[in-house]
Image: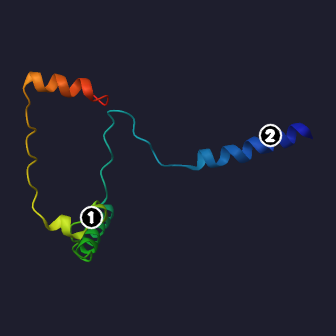
Amino acid sequence: MRKFAIAAMFAVIAVPALAGDEHVPMYGEQPKEKTEAQKADDRKAERAYQRSLNNVPDQKAVDPWGAARGDDASKKPATPAKPAVKHSSKDSSKAKSGNPAN
């Protein structure tokens, strides 16, 4: 009886695996030609897809950092950064010795 139950379980598991009649093409194998009905269905689906794209309204440009900058900052034109002031070598050695952050 136990053997019969195990055989039945294997049969139940194997049936769905064998039921798939969809052919998976191997590497280099040419796909089968589509029938006229399949080609018509593909054209119909493509037209429906294009129509659905026309139903989407145009979106305005999104500024993800707009909330961080604020409204007034996004309207100002970007200005280039000012170049750093160069010090002579004598002045920079004094500033470095007195500043522990450097």
Q: Quadrant of residue 90?
A: top left
- Say which residue label 2 marks: 7
- Nearer-the-camera pick, 47 or 60: 60
Amino acid type shown at disc 1: Gly
Q: Secondary structure at mark 1?
A: helix
Q: Is residue 95 above or below residue 34?
A: above
Q: Is residue 99 left or right of residue 12?
A: left
User: In x, y percent, where is residue 68?
Assistant: 30, 61
Q: Quadrant of the N terminus?
A: top right
Q: How is the image coloured?
A: rainbow
Q: Residue at x 20, y 28 (%)?
A: 95
User: In x, y percent, where is residue 22?
Assistant: 48, 49
Q: Quadrant of residue 77?
A: bottom left
Q: Is residue 32 left or right of residue 80?
A: right
- Say which residue label 1 marks: 66
Q: Quadrant of residue 92?
A: top left
Q: Secondary structure at mark 2?
A: helix
Residue at the right extreme, as displayed: 1
Q: Residue at x 7, y 26 (%)?
A: 88
